[in-house]
Image (spheres, rainbow, N blue to C red):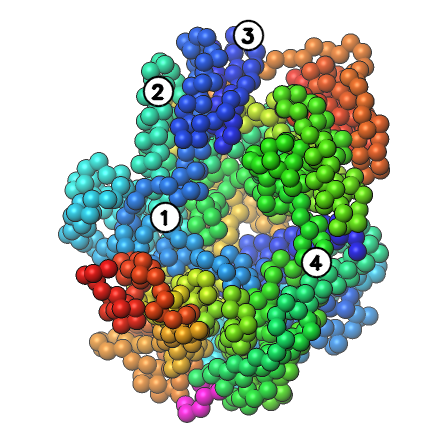
Amino acid sequence: MDFVTMNILESTMVSICREMGITLMKTSYSTIFNEALDFTCGLADLNGDMIAVADYCPAQIGGMPLLVKSCLKEIPASELEDGDVILHNDPYRGGLHTPEHTFFKPIFVSGELVGYAVAIGHIAEVGGMAPGGFCGEATEIFQEGLRVPPVKIKKRGEDNIEVWKLLLANVRTPRVNYGDLRALIAAVDLGEKGMRGVYEKYGLETVRRNVSDLLLYSERRMRAEIEALPDGIYPFSDIIESDGIDAERHYPIEVEVHVRGGEIVVDYTGSAPQAAGPINATLGVATSAAYNAVLHMTDASIPRNSGCFRPIRVVAPPGTIVNVDFPAPSVGGNTETHPRLVGAILGAMAPVAPDRVMAAEGATHCNFVFGGVDAETQEFFACYDLEGVGWGGRSFADGNDGVDSINGNCRITPVEVYETRFPWRIESLAFNVDSGGAGAHRGGLGYTKQMLCLNDVIVCSQMTDRHLFAPWGLAGGGEGGCGATLVQNAGRDDWRTMPEVYGKASTSRYSNVAIKRGDRVRLVTPGGGGYGDPAERSPEAVARDVREGYVSAAAAQRHYGYDEGGK
Amino acid sequence: MTRILGVDIGGTFTDFVSYDAETGSIETWKNLTTPSEPIEGVLEGLRRIADLGEIGKIRLGTTIATNALLTRKGAKIAYVTTEGFRDVLFIQRANRRSHYDIGWIKPRPLVSRADCHEIPERLSAKGETVTPLDEAAVRALAERIRADGTIEAVAVCTLFSYIDPRHEARIRDILAEELPGLPVSTSYEVLPKWKEYERASTTVADAYLKPVVSDNLRRMKARLDALGVGARVGVIKSNGGEATLDGAAESPVQMTLSGPTGAVVATRALSEITGIRRLVTFDMGGTSTDCSTVVDGAEHVTTDFEIEWGVPIQIPMIDIHTIGAGGGSIAWIDKGGMLRMGPQSAGADPGPACCGLGGTEATVTDANVVLGRIDPANFLGGAMALDAEAAARAVAAVAGPLGMEPDAAALAMVQIANNNMLGALRAVLLQRGLDPRDFTLLASGGAGPVHLADLMEIAGIPAGLVPNHPGQFSAFGFIMTDGRVDRHRTVQQISKFFDAARATEAMTELSRGAAAELLAQGYSDRIAIHRSIEARYLGQNHELELSYPSDAFDEASVADLWARFHVEHEARFGFSIPGETIETVNLKAVAVAVSKKPALPLLPEAAGPAAPRGRRRVRFEEGWIDTPVHDRAALRAGHVLTGPAVIEEDASVTLLKPGQTLSVDRFGHLHVKS
């Protein structure tokens, strides 16, 4: 291997991906893009293997290789022309969930197809039965928004007007969607141009050979990382509380991580049969979750590409919540089931890799989505919004407070932007004291966002979890605090759950609740589990937590024997 | 009173550049910095000047603010905000530094949560009062702060204060009444822009710095006053402008990045002198490299600075992209067998192996010695002899496991380090839509000129420039500095319902405020105002900046603004959306008091071709080449050299690759062409 050229090519390709992301961030319209940065930009080779990617949203990184390959099965490379841009979002064709839109552009050098520039972004509004694309009560994919099989949104550099018309006629916010789609196209244009420059500078053969070596190099390093883990079979289980349809049922997740000779097999056998509601993960999501978990446990300096994934395999029986069959709904699989799968894999590995895992994090993005017609402007608005949760405690540190769940790396939208854009007033944004699980290293805190409705009606839906089953601790650590969603109707003093007020099946998953002017909504996000025996927590850390208000004196007394007067 | 003195107080050295307007002569020198009391190093350097009465102006670049932030040695402060929102500083934006990092620890703000307080008050997104300010609660808080007795300054940031600062101003006034003498920073005065976390973080940094910086500047002023020069001292701000010592103490967050701005200001001056319109700076030192741009006579200003990841300071600063790669970056082999350079650095202690100060690991400097690019006998003008054998040993230790010859390994080390630095150039050029092919690369710092030729080639930059005194370039910039005040404010409006009167009022306030601040600091004449507007398509969240000619907005000027926006969007991002609603976000006014620029001394004309001082073997990609070595001091205006060549001077070495040419202009600048 020519390590020097390979090193230079790798960092050049990653910068191209980063530049694609900057264009996307700067030109897109939805807050989920430009504030939250819920997108990913990468480059693929002729086979659809990912050869470079920039750090934006991890859930999409693991999904990218399968996505491009699935599209190429449907539109073969022979039908691609210079200047084409392909668009796709179908979970049943390698996609992750309907909001995740994949754009890719073939790269031609001297008339020869050499690879693809890829951008995947979360489009906030996709049509379907609930504004904002997260219908907590969907029972089939058709309710989750417009399904787009691989189509050419641009042909030989020209807009394919028919496709644009169909796309924009089926969503509630065509002006905003138009801006987001344009931004995604600008990103793949930039990637294609940048990569063409690389091929022209180094020559086809040099790039091909080095890219192939680069994938091998990543694979070799990943195998070395896995070899350092003791061989064995490591089981773990967790539970998803509801599918939003059946009020009585819970959905177990079972994982068995087989580590043997430099390879990892994640076996999900035993996980619940697929649900009627939208908590199902596609095979792409379950695979991406396994990749995500392994990347979290291994050296972060390994160049991220398809080579990293070669030593990782997944067993996911069809017809289950980890490999859903058509036409069941799947929007929550990507945001909610994914981090729970990652958490379960980390939990499984905790006994043999204690310094590379954490106790359960909140593992939800809260996914509070809403839409309506603005009373002042008469324009339809829609928003997909997410919130931070507590991280789990670690063998070496407390869990971080208020951080986006591990399968995303999104930013929350500032209050001042939120209120300028949408008719809500946010009344508070405050940590949930005592929501971090007790432990030698306590869990991180979740927080509460309280909002007042300023529009006649705002139609709200949600897809979250951890209202019933608390985030687990590790090595003797305690459970983190549960989340909640509560409503205070105008003129009332009490706070009630969605089932109590609107007769929904679940407190955490519901759709199309009409929140009226003067109603308040309180989103409480879960904390993280603790790590290690609370008795081993240093008295200084306990006293600091009490002084700074992360832990109440009463809870400190209960978990740590803290004595307010004495120490 | 004809001398202007630029003083750059760095971590290791304090650099001095003196310009005498009467004789037109420039002198440079340096001495060690006293980190515990930086003024000592300044006073030591001043001893070189026999008659301090000659000094008309001393401009200081200082790291007081930078160090207080980086080492977290600022004041113990209290934070005051809207009821319900004290945790904004701790929740931050809820994202994390990087993916796949279980070990990450979320950054802490510069204030303890126990010292964060909420006051009942609230404005709406349109600036209407939702909850009036509870003045009694502010007085009660003042009482708590007084009783506590440990609080040294207060930061105030309430929601939507960028629209109307009346609550923040009232909180400030009440605190001033109740706690006279306690410094208070309000977000409206520090950064009247939207996004509460970023504004709060910036305001907290200002309060955090105030006691430390004012104290330091006061001590500095007293010592300089004792020499009779205190009134003639200016401090360099992050925007590259100058403030008086008192002005700097008022708003210390403005000094977050002081010293490194000098190189950019100097570059702007060189742009004017040489007529080169597009320059990209490449200031390479021992541990880090700074890059920035000067386009059409203007530096690029950013508001995206972070103290550490996730802790922003969003005041306008010269956009300097710093990466942790320099002459001291260490070579290592990763677990997969790949050669990497840095970010670990040998720094000044233990230093590169060739320095003989105890370092044994191979650094970029060692590689340059092995390649014959740096002459071990002529480092720092011969003031420090390098140990070539130690360099060879260190490089051989890296070459062995790679199965490479030492010279090939040294070349690979330099290539990888160059590629890391290329990342910084991409960040300031391509990532901002600037085409490297239109630029000239300006190399400064001790190590910059050594890598200039390589970087020109890999970055696709066709021209290079090595200024005089590349090792003291920042201090040189300080003799060219102008008085400058930047004022920004969020005044959000959309093109459909644009209120020209509101925009006119806000712009007038900004430009008058900026000019008034300059006047208050004692700048009286030649004040120019530059106005601009940040706008975007309604729904986007990042803005394009468009210049704007006056305080007044009318139908024609606004129509022109919208038209220019579409054109700019197309140019920057490759598409525009004709007919789309445009949103204006921030208005900006910059007041500049243009100082009289020194007339630089001229070099005598060349009488014949340049004669090399000697020759030595230098390793290029092509192999070892017997290369002429020139003494820069012997070069004259009009000299032209053809690569390969090495040009040596006191604090640096310029390398010319085969095929490149170098010409000397009448000021002595070296112009390199590929």
**Above-or-below relation of A5 to A271:** above
Which one is earlier in the sequence, the residue at label 2 or at label 1?
1
Question: What number is the disc on residue B23?
Answer: 3
Q: Dot 1: within a 10 Å radius of its alpha carbon, few (fewer than 14), some, or many (20 or more) residues?
A: many
Q: Residue B664 location in percent, x, y?
A: 72, 20
Q: CA distance from mark 3 to mark 1?
A: 49 Å
Q: What x and y, as percent, mark residue A425?
A: 33, 64
Q: Which residues are magenta?
A: A242-251
Seen at 78% across and 62% down, the residue is A212
Mark 4: few/some/many CA within 10 Å (<14, 14-19, 20+): some
Q: Which residue is mark 2?
A: B223
Q: Are marks 2 and 1 in contact (CB under 8 Å)?
A: no
Q: Considering depth in this image, is A24 or A234 the residue closer to the camera?
A: A234
Mark with earlier residue (3, 2): 3
Q: Position of residue A148 (x, y in %)?
A: 63, 76
User: Where does label 1 land, which residue?
Assistant: B110
Q: Earlier in the sequence, mark 3 or mark 1?
A: 3
Residue beneath the point at 72% across and 26% down: B375
